Image: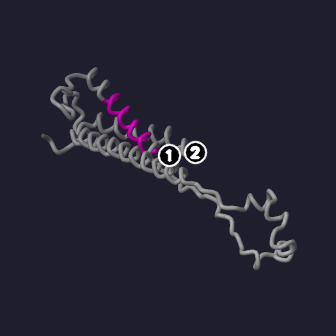
Amino acid sequence: MNMHFEGSSNVTLLFDFWDVRGPAGMVLSVIVVLLLTVMYEFLKVWKITVGKQHSPVTHPPAPVSFPPEQSCFAPVMKCGGGSSALSNSPSEISLSPTETITTADTTAKKSWLLHCLQTAIHILQVTLGYMLMLCVMSYNVWIFLGVIMGSVLGYFLAFPLLNHI
């Protein structure tokens, strides 16, 4: 195997069955490699998009309740034997803490599923990246240019999508 770039139209890429012999096969191989590189760039953007969806959910803090003697309504609540209309009013009832048991479970499950999706995307990205690296290591000028042009085209098309997230 030569350790310098050459412009031949005869090359074997990745596997024995991807044996390029002739200009038509080289053009087709360059297009395939270009599309794989564009897909690699879209995988990078997709992984970032999935990561942004995993922002922590912020819940409003639980309402603070004061004992009746520390409340500003203490004089009102003490009149009438410790019972007042204020303690049974809708505004006082709305201050009582509510339970959110299912929210924590669904948030944890969603977080875990997003992490699994990010892991799968990462596996695809690394595998495709190494395959493209091996294509470049065939030291064929046309395949190398296909990878470079695919990277340029993929970056040009994919990364503006990050502004729309």
Q: Along the line of sight, which residue is nearer the eye, 43 or 139?
A: 43
Residue 122 lies, in percent from the top left, at: 36, 46
| Residue 159 image label | none
In the rendered view, tell whether residue 139 sits above or below residue 104.
above
Residue at 74%, 58% in the rendered image:
94
Residue 125 lies, in percent from the top left, at: 35, 43
Give, as a three-letter code, the residue at label 1: Thr
In the rendered view, tell whether residue 151 sits above or below residue 96.
above
Q: Residue furthest left?
A: 1
Q: Residues within 10 Å of mark 2 (few under 14, many from 20)?
A: few
Work out whether mark 1 precedes mark 2 in sequence or the reverse, and give the earlier one. 1
Q: Secondary structure at mark 1?
A: helix
Residue at 55%, 51% in the rendered image:
103
Residue 64 lies, in percent from the top left, at: 69, 69
Q: Along the line of sight, which residue is nearer the eye, 22 or 124?
A: 124
Magenta extent? 30-45
Q: Residues within 10 Å of mark 1 (few under 14, many from 20)?
A: some
Residue that label 1 marks: 49
Residue that label 2 marks: 165
Q: Residue furthest bottom?
A: 69
Give, as a three-letter code, the residue at label 2: Ile
Q: Are marks 1 and 2 in contact (CB under 8 Å)?
A: yes
